[in-house]
Image (spheres, rainbow, N blue to C red):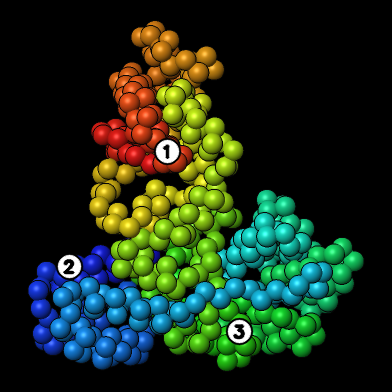
Amino acid sequence: MAFESLSEKLQNIFKNLRGKGRLSEADVKAALKEVKMALLEADVNFRVVKQFTKDVEARAIGADVMNSLTPGQMVIKIVNEELVRMMGEENTELALKPGNEITVLMMAGLQGAGKTTTAAKIAGKLKAQGRTPLLVACDVYRPAAVKQLEVNGEKQGVPVFSMGTSKSPVDIAKAAIESAAKNRNNVVILDTAGRLHIDEQMMEELIAIKENVAVDQTVLVVDAMTGQDAVNVAKSFDEKVGLDGIIVTKLDGDTRGGAALSIRAVTGKPILFVGMGEKLSDLEAFHPDRMASRILGMGDVLTLIEKAQNSIDEDKAKAMEQKLRKAEFDFNDFLEQFDQIKQMGSMSDILNMIPGMQGKISEADMPDEKSVARTVAIIKSMTEEERRRPDILNPSRKNRIARGAGVSIAEVNRLVKQFDQTRKMMKQMSGMMGKKGRRGGLGGLFGGKGGKGGFPF
């Protein structure tokens, strides 16, 4: 996650505060000086940082905090509340018209910010909510953009309206809305052209679309990896075109992420969504309170629950629970469970959402993609009968499986041993497993890097 470095620094600062029985004014000021440096290093706008630390200090240096039995915790609570306030306090959703009335969304942004992919991600989300979106290819300067939108639209099961690159974006937008009315599409998403930098031609084109088409919401897509440039871009677009909301992409990357903290404070415009990966499902609604919790290492259970509800089939989960209770699961069940968990995102992201887990598991204990791929290859090299009946795996069969998977016999033996241990453990726990059984227990099959130990899901 983008805020990993910031989160680690803040947690260390607050750990020192919690270790003190009483706090002096000097203690608070020293801690806030470190907080200020951590935020600046995370690329948060310096004016925003200055106001933030000023607001926290005004609240933290007071009788209520200083005389509290847990002053350190009180300061953390204040920092959390001020972080939420800085990012907007409440999550803001897309304003959609009711029923079959057409809502027109215009996507804007610089080239490379992920605008076309984000348009398709939004379309998929709206479709899942029962809407009938239509994606519109208004980028007439980059033929690849039209093709990209068509490919992503097909993946999402959402129709794409395009007229090639010979028509003007205004004419394409007008025709698309007529098409939407005929085909009962109640959300039209205009994917406009981007440029490598802000120029007058791009702005005039967006203004022309808004003058000729009743755009309900103009949404800007910015790249978190560009840091303060993202904030400056948002400010320019809002001044010249007018914005209703912002989407921050690439917040899962190795970036400082300060743009996401600064944008609302600088522009006054809400962040609607954050892009947390390249998959078309990797778009999260932006909740300031949940983001603040993640940054402060408090986890984000609500988002984790939502991810699970969207990714895991309830009927399959119930069936798996029964198998776990009876310790009857096999390697086929393991593969299925792994696929469902993989849809929720990376293991590091999932763990960071669990309170108290952030930073507790080292990279060495995290299953990397290669070790996971080897495990899957081993299971897929088994016959159907071997997957269903692991007990029949003798040395001869294991040798054949190892050759088929391109791994050593030792790795096959390790996997089978871990599988047996997990099944025995689940049998012993079967009397104690209530609803917790649904979370599964097959993760013990994944060793860390090098295959050492187990990694519980």
Q: What element carries label 1?
A: loop
Residue type marked 1: Gly
In front of the other: label 1 or label 2?
1
Residue at image position (47%, 80%) is 88
Say which residue label 2 marks. Answer: 15
User: For residue 365, which quarter of the picture?
Assistant: top left
Q: Point out residue 224 in the picture as x, y percentages from the top left corner.
A: 45, 71
Mark positioned earlier in the residue sequence (3 or 2): 2
Q: Which mark is residue 434?
A: 1
**Quadrant of the rendering where the N terminus is positioned:** bottom left
Q: Which residue is drawn at 56% across and 36% down?
A: 316
Determine which quarter of the picture holds residue 247: bottom right
Specify whether 347 is left or right of 269.
left
Q: What element carries label 3?
A: loop
Instruction: Locate residue 424 relative to residue 145 in the image: left or right.
Output: left
Q: Give above or below for 285 relative to 388.
A: below
Q: Residue 243 carries which label?
A: 3
Q: What amino acid does circle 3 point to? A: Leu
Q: What x and y, as percent, mark residue 421? A: 31, 24
Residue 107 visible (yes or no):
yes
